[in-house]
Every structure is written in C-alpha cells, then in structure tokens.
Amino acid sequence: MSSTPYPLLSRIESPTDLRRLAQTQLVPLASELRQFLIQTVSQMGGHFAAGLGTVELTIALHYVYDTPRDRLVWDVGHQAYPHKVLTGRRDRLQTIKLKDGLAPFPSRRESEYDTFGVGHSSTSISAALGMAIGAARAGEPRRVVAIIGDGAISAGQAFEALNHAGALDVNMLVVLNDNDMSISENVGAMSNYFARVLSGKTYAALREGGKKILRRVPPVWELARRSEEHMKGMVLPGTMFEEMGFNYIGPVDGHDVDALV
C-alpha cells in the first residue's frame, strides 16, 4: 500500500502522465485531486468552488486532448486550479498570489499549457476562435476548446464570438459549464431525455446516413431538415446553439468523468 496520500496524483507531472493511466483510474484520481485542492486551498486561501466544480472536466479534457498541442482556454480563470495541478504545478499551488508565486489565473508566462492570459470572464470563446482560425490557416491539425460558465456566457463578447464561430468551419469545441448559478432554471426531464436521444451514437449515425441519402433529393432533404430543426426547437434549449451553427450535445453530468471522456 502506498505511503503517499495521493498515490495517483503524485505520479502526474504533466498531462502525458495522465494519459498513461487506464480510464478506470480516473475516478480515484478525481477524488485525490479534489482532496488535494481542499487541503491546499484551505491553508493558503483562494477560490474553492470554481476549481472543485471542474475536477472531472479538467481530467477528461487533458485525458482526451493532446495538450499542449491542442489548446484549452479557461473562462473564468478561477476554475483553472485543477488544470494547474495537472500541468506540473502541483507542488507550487500553495504559492498562488504570493510574491514570485503562481498566478491565480492562467498565465502564458507561467506555462505552455496556459494558452491565454485570461482575466475574469467572457473572453475564452473569442480567444479560442482566433486560435482555431490560426491553426486552420497554418494547416495544423490542432483542436481548440473553450470552457465557459453559464454566467460568463451571458456577456455580449461571448455571444459575438459564438455568432462568428458558427459561421466558420473550424475545429473548435465550446464547453458550457452550467453549475446551477445561473438566473434561469435548469432544463427539465423532457429536455434531458431528448438531449440524450439527439446526442446518442445511434441517432448521430442515422442522422449522418440520412443526410447523405436525402441530399440527392433536394425537396425531400429540405423538408427533412426543417422538420428536424422544428422538433428540436420545441424541446431543446440547445437549439439556440444549433441555430448559431454548433452541434449541441448534452447535458452531460460534469462530475461523471467516464461520461465526459
């Protein structure tokens, strides 16, 4: 039995180490990371809730994406504490806000994994879009992810970026982290049900297969396209993002690391 209180976390010096783990080890890793954050932040002070709420999401993103080649843009910066721990700064986390210590937000001067020097909120989608456009023009197969909260996404800059991104064909993912702090109520059981159906593998396969066939008959294709959009519009809050050109998938339990992966 290991003598360290964090047998898995102590092995993670970079996301490369994380990606060497079996997926079955991610749940216990999340538990260790959460406990480490609680112990460290309770001693040094800082922002508890935002970081604790993104433990599983951070693990899943670094596990699936090839960071730092693939880019993660965090919005707001307070939720990036787990990101700092997994990217080689675990032993310096207690220096946040101290002289010559770690920055409380992602900082490009601090780590190659910090892709954008964020302030407080609502800038991530704009920054990620610029990175995605740059990668596309350079012919680089880089993927870009913006992680934004339900409060931050309400800002005009975020919607402007969504509107712009939806009109472009770029390799970009926007993760909306809804942590129940929004003014609006959460979506109900009916919306959750249709979200599971519309984002399932079987539905996606049938949808793409149907597109290829129906495009050969333009009048039928147009009728099918409009029927699908109207059906989703009646039951899914994600239709707003679909209308902007995004493929909406969700909701997904942000604390279920296997579902996120």
Image (tube, rainbow, N blue to C red):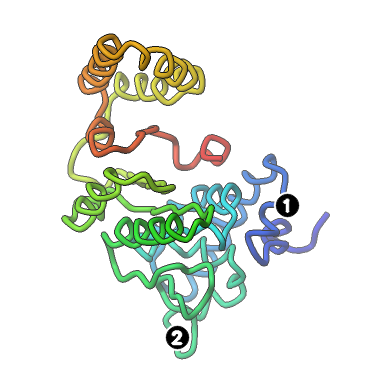
- Is residue 143 or residue 234 the one in the foreground? 143
The secondary structure type at the circle numbered 2 is loop
Give the quadrant of the N terminus: bottom right
Instruction: Identify the residue at horizontal 45%, vertical 42% (top origin).
Output: 254
Of marks 2 and 1, the one in the foreground: 1
In the figure, 237 relative to 223: above or below?
below
Q: Position of residue 89 (x, y in %)?
A: 58, 72
Q: Position of residue 16 (x, y in %)?
A: 68, 59
Q: Quadrant of residue 39?
A: bottom right
Q: Position of residue 43 (x, y in %)?
A: 49, 73
Residue 38: in sight, yes or no? no
| 222 displayed left or right of 61 | left
| Count of numbered tags | 2
- Is residue 101 or residue 119 the one in the foreground? 119
**Residue corresponding to mark 1:** 20
Disc 2 to disc 1, C-alpha distance:
33 Å
Q: Residues within 10 Å of mark 1 (few under 14, many from 20)?
A: few
| 180 displayed left or right of 112 | left
Instruction: Identify the residue at horizontal 53%, vertical 74% (top origin).
Output: 111
In the image, what residue type sits under mark 1?
Arg
> Looking at the image, which residue sits at the far bottom?
99
| 191 displayed left or right of 250 | left
In the image, what residue type sits under mark 2?
Leu
- Is residue 1 or residue 87 the one in the foreground? 87
Q: Which mark is residue 98?
A: 2
Which badge, 2 or 1, comes first in the chain's sequence? 1
Q: Position of residue 41 (x, y in %)?
A: 48, 69
The secondary structure type at the circle numbered 1 is loop
Q: Which mark is residue 41?
A: none
Instruction: Identify the residue at horizontal 45%, vertical 75% (top origin).
Output: 108
